[in-house]
Image (cartoon, rainbow, N blue to C red):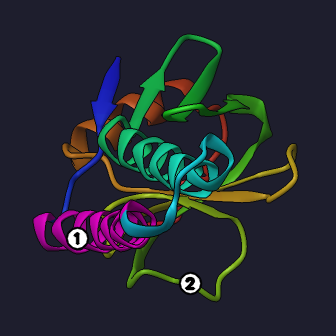
Amino acid sequence: MTFRSRVDKRMVVFITVVMMSVVSLAGDTLLFSASTLWEWLPFIFLFVVAALCFWMLMTVKYVITEQQLNVQAGLIKSTIPYQKITRIERFRGLGYTSGGYKLHLVGDGFEIYYSNGWFGSVRISPQQDEQFLKEIRRHLSNDSIDL
């Protein structure tokens, strides 16, 4: 079952405006000074990075399969087997100083702690909170959901 991320429209607009501003300022500066392809490479690089960031923002999803939870955003994909999940907690706030990595676009959701991987936890914000919890509870054999 696939769950899309909830999206805070203000955050997406802010990020889009910042990315477009950086790209347009760089392009505006280069428009009057760049004459060779090598001088345009920084602008092309900025444009590609901005496009990748926007793509990642728009494609955040959480897929519950029979064996694992897949968390995806653009090129980023994390596979978390159910037996490796140690606990699930609710969070409030964006949590820039907390551990783990964030694949959520709003200020509240779930933090999933797991024993494999580099970060040890991931923050997500599915659109249907209760349905997500119901579905993931079906696959967990222990009492790791602490809500």
Q: CA distance from mark 2 to mark 1?
A: 21 Å
Sort mark 1 into few (<14), some (14-19) or many (20+) by Cα contacts within 10 Å. Answer: few
Q: Is residue 136 left or right of residue 87?
A: left
The residue range painted magenta reads 9-31
User: Considering the numbered disc 1 on the image, is that residue within a helix, a strand or a loop?
Assistant: helix
Question: Can you give x and y, in whole percent of width and height, for residue 22 in the image?
Answer: 39, 72
Q: Is residue 39 left or right of residue 27?
A: right
Q: In the image, what residue occupies the spot 61% across and 57% down?
A: 42
Count of residue discs: 2
Rendered view: 82 above or below 5:
above
Instruction: Look at mark 2 in the image and give the residue it sits on.
Output: 96
Question: Can you give x and y, in whole percent of width and height, for residue 90 in the image?
Answer: 43, 69
Rendered view: 70 above or below 10:
above
Instruction: Look at mark 1 in the image and give the residue it sits on.
Output: 17
Q: Is residue 135 left or right of residue 98?
A: left
User: Most prominent secondary structure in the magenta stretch?
Assistant: helix
